[in-house]
Image: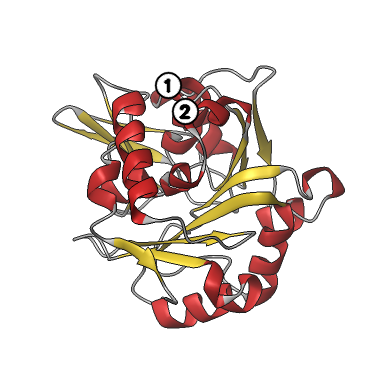
Amino acid sequence: MAGRAPLSSLLPEVNFSDWGDVRYLHLGTEWVQGSMRLDAPYEIELEYVQRMMAWLLFVAPAEVPKRHAMQLGLGAGALTKFCRKQLRMRTTAIELNPQVLAACRGWFKLPPEDAKLRVVIADAAGEIRKDEWQGAVDALQVDLYDHEAAAPVLDSEAFYIDCRRLLTEDGCMTVNLFGRSSSYERSLAKIAAAFGPEALWAFKPTREGNTVVLAQRSPERPKRERLADRAQAIQTRWGLPAPKWLRVFKPVSS
């Protein structure tokens, strides 16, 4: 089964496909831009998207609902829905293409906006420079790809400096690095230049080739025992496979 949203003259068409019990979002190509399990629309289906929640390892579980999450790139809304519905956080998503938002509302169960959920239709590069966001984000999740999924759309040192300015003192950014034309080493060097190499953690790549990098506004190196306790709490409370993360998630500079 497949559906299609109206075309824009400047932006790629937005459509979806269903395979078994999973629905996939596409931007006019076969590349998957997001997914949703039809029988569990508020859970996170893709492994790399689950790993974008690794900032939870650095926050006491009881504090999570008091925090503010921001996604740059809405995709199929998995992170936005999880932060708002499961974690009960204040959640803001910034998305360039209004048809992606329409698709998320019509096909991917994105809840309506309320006091704790806001979707901003804007170019993320410009939006995140606005005063209202500076120092106001606890968990920044960056997953910005065009319809070809060849490389991150925004991937400069200046962009990552702007991202760091969004974060609270103990805030974290997670970034998905993937693409045929991308270079993990180059991207990592740009993030390190913006945050400092001691602030970086990284997962090993998934089988699909997605590498999630985490950068902390204020670097810390918790003991593995504390991370293990946190990971177990994350799995118990929210069903994310956080104990498995610790096998493939390490500081970049140690």
The quarter of the picture where the N terminus appears is top left
Question: Can you identify the residue that label 2 sits on?
Answer: 81
Give the residue type that dot 2 points to: Lys
Where is residue 51 drawn, in percent x and y?
35, 49
Q: Which mark is residue 126?
A: none
Question: Relative to residue 210, is residue 12 drawn left or right?
Answer: right
**Observer-nearest residue: 224 or 122?**
224
Question: Relative to residue 138, is residue 185 drawn left or right?
Answer: left
Question: Can you identify the residue that label 1 sits on?
Answer: 109
Give the answer, above or below, for where 157 lies relative to 208.
Answer: below
Viewer can see residue 178? no
Give the residue type that dot 1 points to: Lys
Residue at (74, 58) in percent of width and height: 165
Using the rendered view, name the quadrant where residue 38 is placed: top left
**Observer-nearest residue: 182 or 135?**
135
Using the rendered view, name the quadrant where residue 44 is placed: top left
Q: Check disc 1: other Cα within 10 Å, few if <14, some if 14-19, many if 20+.
A: some
**Observer-nearest residue: 18 or 142?**
142
Instruction: Identify the secondary structure beneath mark 1.
Output: loop
Q: Check disc 2: other Cα within 10 Å, few if <14, some if 14-19, many if 20+.
A: many
Where is residue 168 drawn, in percent x and y?
70, 48
Residue at (54, 37) in percent of width and height: 99
Question: Relative to residue 30, is residue 226 drawn left or right?
Answer: right
**Observer-nearest residue: 116 or 93?**
116
Where is residue 93 drawn, in percent x and y?
60, 39
Residue at (31, 54) in percent of width and height: 31
Q: Nearer the viewer, mark 2 or mark 1?
A: 2
Q: Determine the residue located farthest toward the right in the rendered image.
A: 131
Viewer can see residue 142? yes
